[in-house]
Amino acid sequence: ATFKIGYLVGSLSSTSINRVLSKALISVAPEELEFTEIPIKDLPLYSQDYDADFPPAGRALKDAIADADGILFVSPEFNRSIPGALKNAIDWGSRPWGTNSFARKPTGIIGTSPGSIGTAVMQSSMRSVLSFLDAPQLNAPEAYIKFDPEAFGADGSVTDEGTAALLRHYMEEYSAFVQRVLAANAPGHI
Ligand code: FNR
């Protein structure tokens, strides 16, 4: 079986190191995972005024989340929290009220930063938001990645063996987690 993973890159930067990380994660992921990016850059800033008639970008986001077996967030940390563009996308996905797209959807949170905290505080903020949205999260392993330009190629290759092993382990555990949540969500389970 294959499992469809929708991933969101929490950076709008054309030189994003988190986009590099997303490519690296895909390159080492187990073969049962199929990846599709869920773009966030064309979403307007969310307002409840949109609830009566969601614009195409908002609908596309909700459809993409619904279509995915699992969601993976690959994001920088901005000012010790979630980048606004990513939080905006999550707000879109959570609405209109009663149609939260993240409910029971298995998620993973990972990110990289030039600093040694490696997006730990962003990840902690994300856990609060996703818990409120009833999204199960891979709890372990955590991965706080200090970006070493020597370890990554722009194409997603991982030249450092220790980094490759860490990312491979993360994606193997993420795949197993997604499959456990899907089984638990299946009709007949409580
Ligand atoms: C940052 N950066 C940053 N880094 C960090 O480790 N913790 C932080 O709180 C912040 N805060 C922050 C705020 C803003 C507005 C910017 C633009 C940057 C640095 C950040 O990690 C660095 O710019 C990364 O390259 C951002 O990731 P992308 O966009 O390259 O994927």
Image (cartoon, helix red, strand yellow):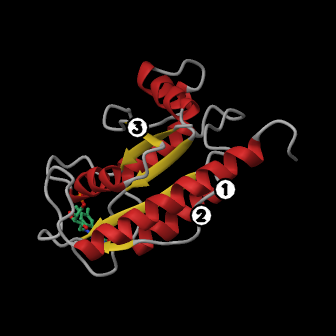
Left or right relative to 83: residue 132? right
Amino acid, disc 1? Phe
Horizontal and vertical percent for residue 140? 56, 71
User: Residue 56's x, y, as percent?
Assistant: 44, 19
Check mark 3 vs ligand 1: CB closer than 8 Å? yes or no: no
Other-residue count near label 2 (Cα within 10 Å), few / some / many at <14 / 14–19 / ≥20: few
Percent position of residue 4, x then y: 50, 37
Q: Is residue 182 left or right of residue 37?
A: right
Q: Which residue is mark 1?
A: 132
Q: Where in the image, quadrant-wise, is ligand 1 located? A: bottom left
> Is residue 146 in view?
no
Residue at the spot 15% in from the left edge and 46% down from the top edge = 14
In the image, is the residue at mark 2 within 8 Å of ligand 1 by its beta carbon? no
Nearer-N-terminus badge (1/3) = 3
Tell me the residue at 42%/44% (across/down).
7
Q: Is residue 107 positioned above or below 93 on the image?
A: below
Residue visible at 68% across and 50% down?
Answer: 181
- Mark 3 or 2: in front is 2
Where does the image place residue 44, in percent across and percent down from the top left? Answer: 38, 32
Identify the amino acid type marked 2: Ser
Which residue matches tag 3? Answer: 45
User: Residue under circle 2?
Assistant: 128
- Binning the other alpha carbons within 10 Å of mark 1 as few (below 14), some (14 to 19) or many (20 upward) gives few
Res. 137 image quadrant: bottom right
- Indicate the secondary structure of the residue bearing disc 3: loop
